[in-house]
Image (cartoon, helix red, strand yellow):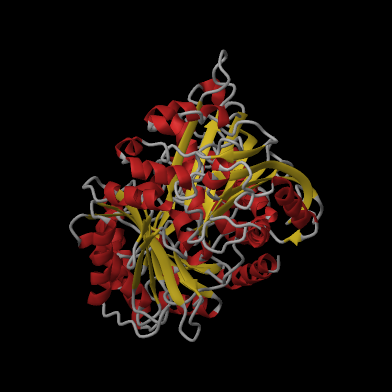
Amino acid sequence: MSGSFNLFRYLKKVPKHLLQNRKANLPRCRGHVLSSTLQSPRLLRPFTCFKHCNQKHFSSKMLSSNLTSMSLEDEEQIDYNFDSILVQNLRTNAKVGTDQWRRSALQPVEVNLRMVLGTRLNGEDNHDLKNSIHYGIASKIVLETIENNEFSGLRNMADTIAATCRNEFKFRDFSVNIRLPKKILRSRSGLVYDAERHSQYHRDSVKIFDLELATIIGIHPFERKEKQRLGLDVAFSVDGDKEFDSLGISDICHEVAKFVETSSFLTIEALVHKLSKFLCFGLSVDCVHIKAEKPSAITFADAPAVQICRSRKTFLLDSIHKYESSVPKIAYISFGSNMGDRMKNIATALKSLSNIEGINLLDVSPLYETRPMYYKDQSLFMNGVCKIETKMSPMSLLRACQFIEQQLGRVKMIDKGPRCIDLDIVMYEDCIYESKELTIPHAGMMEREFVLRPLVALDCTLVHPATQQLLLTKLKELPAQGVKVYATYLSDTVKEGAVTMGVINITPDSFSDGSIVTKTNVVEIAKRMVENGASILDIGGQSTRPHARTVTVQEEIDRVVPVIRAIRNADIQVPISVDTFEVEVAREAIFAGANIINDVSSGTKCPEMLSFAAKAGIPICLMHMRGTPQTMNSLSNYEKDIVQEVFEELNERVQAAIKAGIPRYNIILDPGFGFAKKPEHSVALLNRFDELVKKPEFMDLQWLSGPSRKGFTGRYTNEVEPVKRIWGTAAAVTASVLKGANIVRVHDVEEMSKVITMANAVKMST
């Protein structure tokens, strides 16, 4: 890839007397010692050209039209300030950082020097040598300095050369250009380090030429099938005292190559824009120039190319202008609490957010219990993230969050200490925003599992706006931080492993245990179940066996509600689930003391069920089923893969629940063993149950498995009577736990609780 700077295109703008007899003296030839009168350290800017050492010192700004308005005295002064002595392309070997194989070894270097001093006196008197610099001595001194020293990095090498020359010669300012032609493995031309050593400032820059990469890029279908060549030049400033040794630059090149080669942009413009943002915010570069060319794009031309210059300041200003508009934007707000009733604090904060005009609450992540990271002498946190749509600017949204914190009584006494509620804007579209009060994306998000994990649970395709890194990838790279999914159906505890849900059917026609449970013995049965290991009781008044008779809503209420009241009056405090697909039954059951809705129809039988669960703020179990208990056996044909079809249909219900306002932390899923599935379907689904659990769309959702006494357990154990299917049930329960179930719904609580405990031990030992 060749440089594109054309000096002579700008010469029209220079006062004519500055050009007299000077074109022939322009420093164009490699390997020469030159005296130049067209270069100034004050006006020199990095990145004028991407290549050729003898052109890069010229600046288009130096040759701007502003010079045409200068007075004669000004022109003469600039004339003298341009005077320079150049030594070009001194070639030798040096130890500077590491070589292309990351070894501390000699590598070839090319050095260019520019010493700024007045040549007027020496030019007027051919015999006056006291104002001149002996080129040979200068070259020898620099070569000896390079060959007799080992340099920690390129800045160290430049500083050493500058100091040595300043001790030997008198000049105003000094510039050194160091090229390592073999340093970058993926580059045909290597890298160049430019260092200006002015009496009042230092300015350094790095330029990397001809990176040869391969990536998917282009709008045509054939361009999306295979990677093609991409040539890349990158140049960036180095500010402060930052040392760029050759190892550090190799790391930057590696990150650039990784970014480009894992991307799949449609246009070069998009690629260079995102890459520049990545360099500015991901690799802390203040200003960057990028040139990218696509050699295969045009048959009868070398290559189309795009060249841009971007800075952190540019991106920040763009964000301010872009996100002050009234167009709806997507933002993500993290929330946390470790004081008082954490669930209540979070629910209140989320409701307050949704009640603010201009904010639409779209989605809420699962909840996570987290150890404090910084100030550790405090209680465990409950954390999560919500997704909103808003027309507010970032600062207006910050003010809204702060107002809610104040309303809930947050008082900040210790930095990162205990708090009743904490609301932080972690992402706002692709906004990059920095001020004293607010930084977007949140500065600490990429190091905190309790922020990344809920973000990925909401959308596994999210990328960091600055670095363009997939958040899912970063999450996988993080070390474990003790973050655990919080099960809202278990009140205020986080349990290790699966828990037992005991089945209490108040139905005379249940396929499994009809007529065993009555209103008179239900309290005794419930107590025995809890004593034998049940963490949840599931109470149902409508049989869901195939072809079961549908009872009226009032009859179902009359069966279920008195039982729930009796259990609560007996001071049995475990969570109660009501097994119903009727919203009126659910409403009365919750009022009587139930805590969970278990809807085998996932809200399809009664569409109001989802909105009721959202308003009530209680967990709901959504099961996969086709049709109704009366029709489901005729709907058990799966044309595609069983897991994929169950996933697609169950995901539709999850999205419906989210749209209705149910937060993900209140969604429980059930694959529906035996419902609209033949025995071979249920067995195959159980075998691959973990594939469902691991679907990114279902990340960290809770799962219920209900294989107890189902027909498929009898089919493979030759047990016709449901009550005798205990061994088949035990095997299915074990598989459920090992494959990822959080709740296992069983009839034989005493026996299956022991099976679940053993399966938990096996699973947690791996």
Quadrant into which the C terminus falls: bottom right
Q: Residue at x 50, y 28 (%)?
A: 21
Vertical relation: 753 (above or below) 170: below
| Residue 528 vs residue 8, the one in the foreground | 8
* Residue 105 drawn at (x, y percent): 82, 53
* Residue 19 drawn at (x, y percent): 45, 30
Vertical relation: 137 (above or below) 16: below
User: Which corner quadrant of the image does residue 416 belong to?
Assistant: bottom left
* Residue 167 drawn at (x, y percent): 65, 62
Going by the image, does 756 lie left or right of 593? right
Quadrant into which the N terminus falls: top right
Q: Residue at x 67, y 65 (%)?
A: 763
Q: Residue furthest top?
A: 300
Going by the image, does 608 lie left or right of 194? left
| Residue 96 vs residue 764, the one in the foreground | 96
Residue 547 visible somewhere in the drawing? no
Q: Residue furthest left?
A: 357
User: Which corner quadrant of the image does residue 435 belong to?
Assistant: bottom left
> How many callouts does the rendering have?
0
Going by the image, does 402 lie left or right of 227? left
* Residue 275 drawn at (x, y percent): 51, 43
Residue 763 visible somewhere in the drawing? yes
| Residue 380 vs residue 241, the one in the foreground | 241
